[in-house]
């Protein structure tokens, strides 16, 4: 019946009977087929006290097959009553809608002003705005003229050429001062250098060598000899003079006498 699609509703029913007589409506395959049906199914198996699995898988359960027929096909009086109720509801809704529209129309009518009055108001507003615009432009022009005058005066007092000339004069003064400071600093450094050189000359070993002294060191290990006890017969010595060096050999060692 689902494949044919020839009916709008199906009634699955049977009269009363024993549990064995109604057992076919508890079968799984039938319950699944009822559940899969695309057409609504009313289950009306047995009497009011009888329940089967199909009652739970169907779209609606009727206590008896005759009750299922009454559910599927309404009586003429019932249909007339439903139509009358719908007609009454429709009339009420339409009347309410019309009343609402009348109230809104009346509100719009009251809020609608005379077009000539509205045009007069708008014209007056345009005149007001025009006058405000003229005054605003005049005020802005005056303000800009005053600002231009002040800037021109400021520019006259702060001539860039004069500023550059003053900066050049200041730069020449700074250069002159820098030259004096550098000259004084160089002279001070020269005196300091001369004094340090003189002190170094006094402390320099070369100055000592110029007075006839020499620096003696063993050739083997470079040890500077300051005591005769550091020497042994046969040691080779390097003698450094103010100008040049010489190699000598120790012939004898004499210890200092106390």
Image (tube, grey):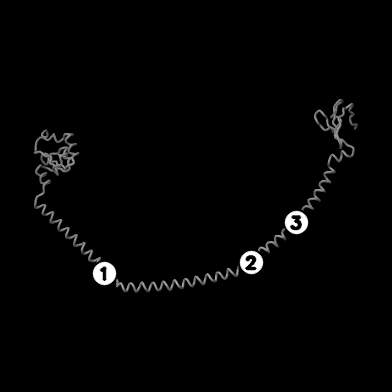
Q: Is residue 114 left or right of residue 98?
A: right
Q: Quadrant of residue 173?
A: bottom right
**Is mark 1 in CB contact (under 8 Å) with mark 2?**
no
Q: Choose mark 1 or mark 2, whichever is in front.
A: 2
Numbered circle sitting on residue 72: none
Q: Residue 63: give x, y in percent of width and height.
A: 12, 43
In percent of the image, x 50 and y 71: which residue is there? Answer: 141
Instruction: Measure the C-alpha gap from mark 2 to mark 3.
Output: 31 Å
Quarter of the image with the N terminus is: top left
Other residues around mark 3 within 10 Å, as few (<14) / some (14–19) / many (≥20): few
- Mark found first going from the N terminus, 1 or 2: 1
Q: Quadrant of residue 257?
A: top right
Disc assigned to residue 179: 3
**Residue beneath label 2, please?**
159
- Cα gap from disc 1 to disc 2, whole angstroms: 73 Å
The reply to whether the C-beta atoms of the residues labelled 3 and 1 are less than 8 Å apart is no
- Mark 2 crowd level (few <14, some 14–19, many ≥20, 10 Å Cα): few
Q: Position of residue 50 (x, y in %)?
A: 12, 39
Residue pointed to by mark 1 = 109
Q: Nearer the viewer, residue 185 or 227?
A: 185
Compared to 232, does 211 lie above or below? below
Q: How many marks?
A: 3
Q: Nearer the viewer, residue 14 or 119?
A: 119
Q: Quadrant of the C terminus?
A: top right
Q: Residue furthest right?
A: 257
**SS state under label 1:** helix
45 relative to 101, above or below: above
Q: Secondary structure at mark 2?
A: loop
Element type at marker 3?
helix
Q: What is the CA distance from the residue labelled 3 to the residue labelled 1?
A: 97 Å
């Amino acid at each position: 019946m689902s494949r044919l699609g020839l009916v709008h509703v199906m009634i699955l029913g049977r009269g009363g009977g024993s549990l064995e007589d109604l057992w076919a409506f508890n079968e799984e395959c039938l319950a699944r087929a009822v559940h899969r049906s695309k057409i609504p199914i009313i289950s009306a198996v047995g009497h009011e006290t009888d329940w089967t699995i199909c009652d739970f898988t169907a779209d609606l359960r009727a206590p008896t097959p005759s009750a299922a027929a009454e559910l599927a096909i309404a009586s003429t009086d019932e249909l007339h009553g439903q139509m009358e109720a719908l007609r009454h509801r429709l009339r009420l809704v339409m009347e309410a809608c019309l009343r609402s529209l009348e109230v809104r129309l009346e509100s719009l009518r009251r809020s609608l002003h005379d077009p000539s009055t509205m045009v007069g108001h708008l014209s007056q507003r345009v005149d007001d705005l025009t006058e405000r615009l003229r005054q605003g432009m005049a005020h802005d022009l005056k303000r800009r003229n005053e600002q231009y005058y002040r800037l021109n005066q400021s520019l006259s007092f702060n001539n860039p050429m004069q500023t550059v000339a003053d900066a050049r004069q200041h730069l020449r003064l700074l250069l002159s001062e820098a030259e004096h400071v550098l000259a004084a600093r160089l002279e001070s450094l020269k005196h300091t250098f001369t004094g340090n050189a003189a002190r170094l000359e006094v402390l320099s070993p070369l100055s000592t060598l110029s007075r006839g002294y020499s620096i003696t060191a063993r050739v083997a290990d470079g040890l500077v000899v300051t005591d005769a006890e550091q020497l042994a017969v046969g040691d080779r010595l390097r003698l450094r003079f103010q100008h040049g060096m010489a190699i000598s050999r120790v012939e004898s060692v004499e210890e200092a006498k106390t």
